[in-house]
């Protein structure tokens, strides 16, 4: 109020303690951090996920939310991703994988990090957002209010100067249960509507730096046999084994802060990044609570630690996943080389 009144007087000097904005900057920043990423009410979620978007999600299998994050939230998210990249690996996460760039330097860079939401970091608001914030509220809206739980969290880095993309595939996440030996085992593949993948554009995504592509409507075809089914398909429809060869693709260029959401059986892919721009993406996967249980995330990463992510993902030769097209390399657990953002 003092500043406001002083502005009416030509040449007025601001009295202490208002002689510097710096005295208020920290307070304002803390307020922004506290309010960012909070869960949405059912009414607010309905204003974002409109009836038209619901129809698109059901018929085409995906939806894009444009300009979804504010500048403050995008800044916090970018800082969070940079911090996750420097975390030391752990037995149950984070799990890092690496690749070698295709440029003349052949630099070793991160290709993916998984399992970091519950790690200690400076951006607790972001971790809380991923586990139970606004994004989860929107997925619940897409699922007509059904209960959902965080199942998986990952970052695909796709740094500039020649890094890999991903061949066409379906994620095909699964439910887990303990056998008589107490080891976790895959039970069945989840239906398309039982798992939703949310991809947040940390950087601008173009065809030049490897933006995602989906196949609208192909989620209705069922299992497309990109690889042999790794869990019980139960009552999931199985497409003809040649069906995947004739599906049509749509590239989705995204701005920083946009969100792409698609289901468990949506075919998707992305090209390599041979540009001079990074193309980082932060993913969360939310699943139907009744299908996977409240402890789905802890079970998933326990299972991963004993299988695909054991010994620095040795079983898949250090790749981010089986469909990764980059030059995957193993790492000696030394601190990862930092790539400029």
Image: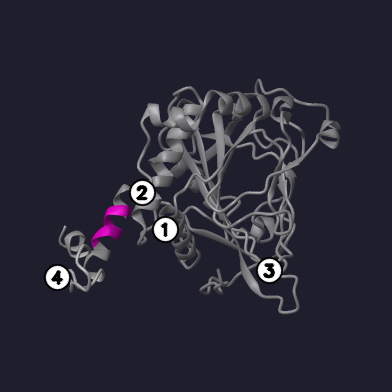
Q: Are marks 4 and 1 in contact (CB under 8 Å)?
A: no
Residue placed furthest toward the bottom: 105
The magenta stretch is 27-32
Q: Name the residue that disc number 3 marks.
A: 276
| Label located before the other in sequence (4 or 3) | 4
Q: Name the residue that disc number 1 marks.
A: 76
Q: Residue at x 22, y 74 (%)?
A: 11
- Is 237 above or below relative to 277? above
Q: Are marks 1 and 2 in contact (CB under 8 Å)?
A: yes
Q: Position of residue 46 (x, y in %)?
A: 45, 27
Point out the image quarter for the N terminus.
bottom left
Q: Position of residue 48 (x, y in %)?
A: 48, 33
Quadrant of the image occupied by residue 278? bottom right
Measure the alpha-carbon separation of dots 1 and 2.
9 Å
| Label located before the other in sequence (2 or 4) | 4
Packing grade of label 4 (10 A; few <14, some 14-19, many >=20) is few
Under circle 4, the secondary element is loop
Under circle 2, the secondary element is loop
Q: Tell me the number on the disc at residue 17.
A: 4
Q: Residue at x 74, y 65 (%)?
A: 274
Measure the alpha-carbon separation of dots 4 and 1.
29 Å
| Label located before the other in sequence (4 or 1) | 4
Q: Name the residue that disc number 2 marks.
A: 36
| Label located before the other in sequence (3 or 2) | 2
């Amino acid at each position: 109020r003092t500043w406001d009144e002083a502005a009416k007087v030509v040449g007025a000097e601001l009295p202490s303690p208002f002689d510097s904005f710096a005295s208020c900057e920290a307070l304002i920043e803390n307020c922004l951090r506290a309010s960012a990423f909070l869960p949405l009410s059912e009414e607010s979620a309905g204003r974002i996920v409109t009836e038209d978007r619901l129809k698109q999600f059901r018929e085409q299998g995906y939806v894009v939310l444009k300009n979804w994050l504010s500048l403050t939230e995008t800044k916090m998210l970018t800082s969070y991703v940079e911090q996750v990249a420097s975390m030391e690996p752990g037995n149950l996460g984070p799990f890092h994988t690496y690749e070698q760039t295709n440029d003349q330097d052949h630099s070793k860079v991160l290709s993916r990090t998984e399992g970091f939401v519950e790690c200690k970091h400076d951006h607790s608001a972001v971790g809380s957002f991923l586990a139970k914030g606004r994004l989860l509220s929107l997925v619940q809206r897409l699922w007509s209010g059904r209960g959902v739980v965080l199942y998986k969290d990952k970052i695909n880095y796709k740094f500039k100067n020649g890094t890999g993309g991903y061949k066409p595939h379906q994620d095909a996440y699964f439910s887990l249960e303990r056998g008589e030996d107490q080891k976790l085992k895959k039970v069945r593949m989840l239906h398309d509507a039982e798992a939703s993948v949310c991809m947040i554009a940390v950087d601008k995504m173009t065809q030049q730096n490897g933006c995602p592509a989906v196949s609208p409507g192909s989620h209705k075809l069922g299992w497309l046999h990109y690889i042999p089914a790794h869990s019980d398909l139960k009552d999931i429809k199985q497409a003809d084994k040649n069906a995947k060869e004739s599906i049509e693709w749509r590239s989705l260029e995204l701005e920083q802060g946009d969100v792409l959401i698609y289901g468990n059986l949506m075919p998707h892919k992305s090209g390599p990044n041979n540009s001079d721009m990074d193309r980082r993406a932060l993913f969360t996967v939310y699943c139907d609570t009744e299908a996977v249980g409240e402890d789905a995330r802890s079970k998933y990463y326990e299972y991963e630690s004993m299988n695909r992510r054991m010994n620095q993902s040795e079983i898949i030769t250090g790749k981010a996943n089986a469909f990764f097209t980059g030059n995957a390399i193993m790492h000696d657990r030394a601190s990862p080389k930092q790539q400029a953002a």
